[in-house]
Image (spheres, helix red, strand yellow):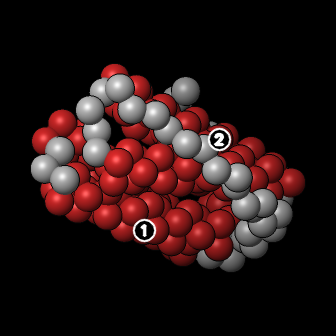
């Protein structure tokens, strides 16, 4: 059985992961409207991953006889600026997610919940990759600044991300 503190921490993180998916769907809609279909597809894949992360956490709680409490989500913005600004917003968001994952791990440590510690280690590694990927895309977009043909090439490459 999971402690009440751990149960709440997992529920909070499930809510954060679902809110991330919601945000990424809004970003995808913004990018579609700006005519960056490749980047929009890339961000939709991010949204799917976030839902998967939420389910991974929820299933961990369910497997251990616990529950998850869902909360209302805040409406995301509609406009995220340029392609580069959108990816900078993604990076900043991922940094917040990383901080939340670290907090979840601290709770698992404090509660001496070894099973949760193992699970959250996977998320810690995942966040390193998420931030690295966003930083790489931002560097490419900065290098392409002002050259629309390069932005279109980057957009095309982002659209090649697998389902």
Q: Residues within 10 Å of mark 2 (few under 14, many from 20)?
A: many
**Residue 36 visible to an observer of this rendering:** no
Q: Which residue is mark 1?
A: 95
- At 64% from the left and 50% from the top, the residue drawn is 71
Percent position of residue 17, x then y? 52, 48
Q: Which residue is mark 2?
A: 44
- At 62% from the left and 61% from the top, the residue drawn is 150
Residue 77 or residue 87, whichever sits in front = 77
Check disc 1 and report its element: helix, strand or loop: helix
- At 28% from the left and 45% from the top, the residue drawn is 3
On the picture, is 126 further left or further right than 12? left
Sequence order check: which comes first, mark 1 or mark 2? 2
Percent position of residue 62, x then y? 40, 26
Q: Nearer the viewer, mark 1 or mark 2?
A: 1
Residue 51 or residue 153, whichever sits in front = 51
Percent position of residue 146, x then y? 68, 76
On the picture, is 130 further left or further right than 54? left
């Amino acid at each position: 059985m999971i402690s009440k503190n751990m149960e709440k921490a997992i529920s909070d993180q499930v809510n954060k992961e679902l809110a991330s998916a919601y945000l990424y769907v809004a970003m995808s809609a913004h990018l579609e409207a700006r005519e960056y279909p490749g980047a929009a597809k890339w961000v939709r894949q991010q949204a799917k991953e976030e839902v998967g992360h939420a389910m991974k956490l929820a299933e961990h709680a369910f497997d251990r006889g616990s529950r998850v409490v869902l909360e209302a989500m805040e409406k995301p913005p509609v406009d995220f600026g340029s392609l580069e600004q959108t990816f900078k917003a993604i990076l900043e968001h991922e940094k917040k997610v990383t901080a939340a994952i670290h907090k979840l791990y601290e709770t698992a440590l404090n509660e001496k919940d070894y099973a949760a510690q193992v699970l959250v280690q996977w998320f810690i590694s995942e966040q390193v990759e998420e931030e690295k990927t966003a930083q790489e895309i931002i560097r490419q977009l900065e290098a392409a600044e002002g050259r629309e043909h390069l932005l279109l090439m980057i957009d095309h490459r982002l659209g090649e991300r697998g389902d």
